[in-house]
Amino acid sequence: MQKVTIEDVDSRMSAADVRRGLSDGLGSTDLAINYYELAPGDSFAFGYHAHVRQEEVFYIQSGSVTFETETGDVAVEDGEIVRFAPGEFQCGVNEGDERVVALALGAPQDSELDEMRRDCKECGEQTPNTLEMADRGEELVTYCLDCGAETGRFD
């Protein structure tokens, strides 16, 4: 048995205000476990994306998250849980005024992305993006793969 206190796990650079990877502390080898706190406007991910092999489950402990999906937006409220199959595109955003607290579970633990898309002002549409470390490892930056424009910065 392994046990961790969420507040004792360091937060990582993310599109969320707080993202704590719990898998290592729990010794999890097959399941990715992440704790999130989303400030208004924050997201679980750097963009609209799908995982090649990983299914993802999000449990919303408090607040409300709107997931962009291929079939339209889906609101998930506190006390609700949602699952995305491998290859299913999604991106969850806190569009409300209150902080969101949530757990994300993914299996298998490998979370290789099929593709990530973001709005590109230069192209005028949602385009495939890449994510790179910038500023001596202090920020993550997304770039449009079609035109090279910067589409987001995260610390």
Image (cartoon, rainbow, N blue to C red):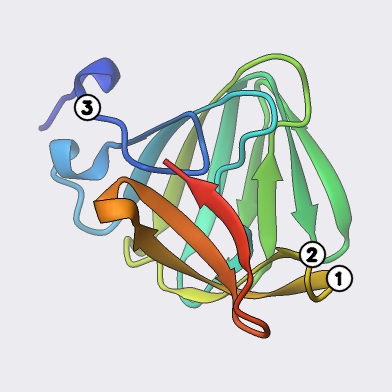
Give the residue pinned by disc 2.
121
The picture quadrant where one finds residue 13 is top left
Disc ID at residue 124: 1
Q: Which residue is mark 3?
A: 9
- Dot 1 or dot 3, earlier in sequence: 3
State the SS at label 3.
loop
Mark 1 and mark 3: Cα distance apart in space: 39 Å
Secondary structure category for the residue under label 1: loop
* Residue shown at the point (51%, 36%) measured from the top left: 16
Task: Tell me, yes or no, whether the two marked residues, 2 and 3, touch with CB atoms within 8 Å.
Answer: no
Q: Give residue 42's position: percent from left, percent from top.
A: 62, 35
Q: Residue at x 78, y 53 (%)?
A: 68
Q: Is residue 38 above or below residue 123?
A: above
Residue positioned 78% across, 71% down in the render? 122
Q: How many marks?
A: 3
Check whether the beta carbons of the residues at disc 1 and disc 2 lie within 8 A of each other.
Answer: yes
Q: Residue at x 38, y 48 (%)?
A: 139
Q: Calculate the distance from the C-alpha at mark 1 to the C-alpha at mark 2.
A: 5 Å
| Amino acid bearing label 3 | Val
> Depth-wise, is mark 2 or mark 3 nearer the camera?
2
- x%, y% of residue 67? 74, 46
Q: Residues within 10 Å of mark 3 (few under 14, many from 20)?
A: some
* Circle 2 Cα neighbour tier, 10 Å, few/some/many (<14 / 14–19 / ≥20): few
Q: Nearer the viewer, residue 52 or 127?
A: 127
Q: Along the horizontal axis of the image, is 16 left or right of 152?
A: left
Residue 99 - label: none
**Disc 1 residue crowd, few under 14, some 14–19, many 20+, Cα 10 Å:** few
Amino acid of disc 2:
Lys
Q: Amino acid at mark 1?
A: Gly
Q: Is residue 73 left or right of residue 115?
A: right
